[in-house]
């Protein structure tokens, strides 16, 4: 593969170099900032007085906004050159944003929505038939507000019920992409007919992890595709059945609209739902059996006993398939002769276990309290394997952060105060206090990966910005008491008793002479922003591995910048077709 600006190899080498250089920063936890003296991980020039201010933190993250936004930020002093170089290196590695601000040169992939496609046919088809994947518009460059984006496109009324604006944006775009890829596959039917001795091929869209079926319903009723839902949650399926009936009843009262994109659109082709938890151990035979059951009584070929693989091809679809679910969809794509196409948008990368030594049963979400340095993910592509890359839980979790959301939080702090950011300092102080107690009790020892488990427990507290530290810490301590690894400790009550005022003041003095409960938040926020800048590089590494793995196996595939990243941060779709 040529190492040019337009090739994934160039981006891959840049990303690997960046991730390796700042691996200690990426694999650290923001909550352990004070407990581990994490400021030692940062270059000294970045910490020189006066320290970084909130407006400067906004500027560091501004490559994820429009050029006008970056230019609107006033900087009252020059930032260290090494920090500016770090900012540009992180911006160069991002895939989910289609424009770089404040730079005269950018990589070729950051000017297009279809990325690293190895099939001219697929790339031409997508860019010519999907409006938002074609030539860049002024909207994508100038960056209209998310509110305007929400208002520009709406689902038809019967499909909008029970759907949030964010979900509506995702459904509209992913449905159009699925329909467009299905149309491309339909163009190959004539050749497939001859190969199968005149058998008519029908393509079924299998919506894996469909939830309440909002996307499936739109694909089926509006776009006229045959859809089968797979969902592990029976409550979601019951709601999907209910919403399907309501939508079908509504559409039966209406006449088909002439502007419909399909001759079968708005006809009541109801999606079929099947309960199944998809894991990396799920086989293609299981999927085929469920599909056959769903078709029973509906498809003539099923009634005549003709095997599914002789009459159907499966199109796997996943909208924000969480963790191992994405891995399972890719595995089904590569191992099943029945599956010939896939559109996949992943999320929750930290729940993807591709290291067999960690979790042998293949279940999703069984690791409740992993150690950040534990290797959970190994590359699947031969290209990435050659670099001997191993990714920890902390790095995978970092790839799931939303930079636009955090920019909004920083802007709010600039205009209305920082109360909502205090929780960063409170949580880090709780970790420091618990660490000091552990050392005093001498009951828990930390060496290598044998870290104290409370550090890695998610402790989101509602309305934390309205609480003082003692109220907040009492909720955290009560929550930690239920952690299984701590439940059998002989001195658990001593470790998790409420913090005293003297204990807190002593910890604050150990942090710094001028530290108080009112200002401990800012060093943690600064550290979080510097670590957050690496998130796009980590996500790019994961997405490139999936893409290269499929390309190495001979699939026609590409990455598509599908959603607006300000609305849906996990906005990259992996499209793959068998040749």
Image: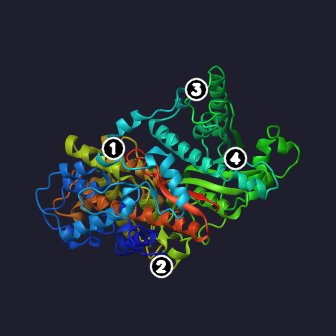
Q: Which of the two discs, 2 and 1, sits closer to the camera?
A: 1
In this view, the mark in front (4 or 2): 4
User: Marks 3 and 4, Cα distance to the nearest angstrom?
Assistant: 24 Å
State how many labels appear.
Answer: 4
Q: How many residues crowd around disc 2 within 10 Å: few (fewer than 14), some, or many (20 or more)?
A: few
SS for dot 2: loop
Badge 4 crowding class, 10 Å Cα cut-off, few under 14, some 14 to 19, many 20 or more, is: some
Category of crowding for the residue at label 3, using alpha-carbon neighbours closer than 10 angstroms: few (below 14), some (14–19), many (at least 20) = few
Q: Nearer the viewer, mark 3 or mark 2?
A: 3
Q: Do the residues labelled 1 and 4 touch (CB within 8 Å)?
A: no
378 to the left or right of 460: right
Instruction: Quote the CA–CA distance across marks 3 and 2.
Output: 54 Å
Q: Earlier in the sequence, mark 3 or mark 4?
A: 4
Quickly name the residue at label 4: 204
Q: How far apart are marks 1 and 3 (CA)?
A: 29 Å
Whether residues under marks 3 and 4 lie with C-beta atoms below 8 angstroms apart, the answer is no
Distance, label 2 to label 1, CA atoms, is: 39 Å
| Disc sitting over residue 279 in the figure | none
Q: What element carries label 3?
A: loop
Mark 1 vs 4, N-terminal side: 1
> Which residue, as the protein is rendered here, is positioned at the far top?
253
Task: Identify the residue position indicated by label 2 in the image.
Answer: 387
Question: At x 44% / y 56%, what residue is drawn?
Answer: 400
Residue linked to disc 1: 139
Q: Can residue 226 be seen in this view?
A: yes
Q: Mark 3 points at which residue?
A: 257
**Secondary structure type for disc 4:** strand
Q: Compared with residue 346, is residue 566 higher up or lower down, i.e. above or below?
A: above
């Amino acid at each position: 593969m040529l190492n040019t600006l337009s090739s994934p190899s160039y981006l891959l080498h840049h990303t690997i170099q960046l991730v390796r250089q700042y691996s200690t920063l990426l694999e650290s936890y923001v909550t352990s900032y004070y407990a581990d003296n994490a400021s030692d991980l940062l270059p000294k020039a970045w910490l020189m007085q006066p320290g970084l201010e909130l407006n400067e933190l906004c500027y560091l993250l501004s490559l994820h906004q429009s050029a006008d936004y970056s230019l609107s930020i006033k900087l009252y002093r020059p930032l260290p050159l090494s920090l500016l170089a770090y900012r540009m290196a992180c911006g160069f590695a991002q895939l989910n944003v289609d424009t770089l601000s404040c730079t005269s040169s950018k990589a070729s992939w950051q000017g297009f929505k279809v990325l690293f496609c190895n099939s001219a046919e697929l790339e031409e088809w997508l860019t010519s038939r999907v409006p938002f994947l074609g030539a860049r518009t002024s909207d994508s460059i100038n960056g209209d507000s998310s509110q305007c984006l929400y208002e520009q496109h709406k689902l038809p009324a019967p499909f909008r019920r029970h759907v949030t604006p964010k979900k509506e944006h995702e459904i509209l775009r992913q449905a159009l992409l699925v329909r467009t890829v299905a149309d491309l596959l339909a163009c190959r039917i004539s050749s497939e007919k001859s190969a199968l001795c005149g058998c008519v091929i029908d393509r079924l869209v299998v919506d894996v992890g469909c939830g309440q079926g909002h996307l499936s319903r739109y694909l089926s009723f509006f776009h006229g595709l045959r859809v089968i839902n797979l969902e592990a949650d029976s409550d979601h399926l019951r709601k999907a059945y209910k919403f399907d009936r309501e939508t079908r009843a509504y559409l039966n009262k209406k006449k088909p609209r002439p502007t419909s994109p399909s001759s079968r659109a708005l006809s009541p082709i109801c999606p079929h739902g099947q309960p199944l938890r998809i894991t990396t151990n799920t086989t293609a035979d299981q999927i085929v059996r469920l599909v056959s059951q769903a078709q029973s009584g509906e498809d003539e070929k099923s009634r005549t006993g003709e095997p599914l693989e002789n009459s159907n091809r499966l199109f796997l679809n996943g909208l924000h398939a969480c963790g191992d679910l994405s891995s399972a969809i890719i595995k089904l794509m590569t191992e099943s002769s029945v599956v010939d196409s896939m559109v996949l948008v992943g999320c929750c990368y930290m729940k993807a276990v591709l290291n067999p030594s960690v979790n042998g049963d293949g279940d999703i979400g069984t690791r409740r309290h992993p150690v950040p340095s534990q290797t959970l993910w190994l590359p699947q592509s031969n290209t990435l394997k050659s670099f001997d890359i191993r990714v920890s839980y902390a790095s995978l979790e970092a790839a799931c952060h939303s930079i636009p959301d955090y920019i909004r939080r920083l802007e709010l702090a600039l205009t209305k105060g920082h109360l909502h950011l205090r929780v960063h300092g409170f949580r880090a102080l709780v970790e420091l206090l618990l660490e000091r107690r552990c050392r005093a009790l001498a009951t828990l020892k930390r060496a290598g990966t044998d870290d104290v488990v409370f550090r890695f427990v998610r402790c989101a507290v509602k309305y934390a910005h309205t609480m003082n530290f003692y109220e907040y810490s009492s909720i955290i301590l009560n929550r930690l008491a239920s952690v299984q690894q701590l439940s059998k400790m002989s001195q658990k009550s001593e470790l998790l008793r409420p913090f005293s005022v003297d204990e807190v003041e002593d910890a604050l003095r150990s942090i710094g002479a001028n530290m108080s409960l009112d200002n401990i938040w800012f060093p943690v926020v600064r550290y979080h922003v510097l670590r957050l800048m690496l998130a796009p590089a980590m996500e790019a590494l994961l997405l490139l591995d999936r893409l290269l793995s499929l390309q190495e196996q001979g699939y026609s595939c590409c990455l598509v910048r599908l959603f607006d990243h300000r609305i849906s941060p996990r906005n990259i779709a992996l499209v793959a077709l068998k040749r």
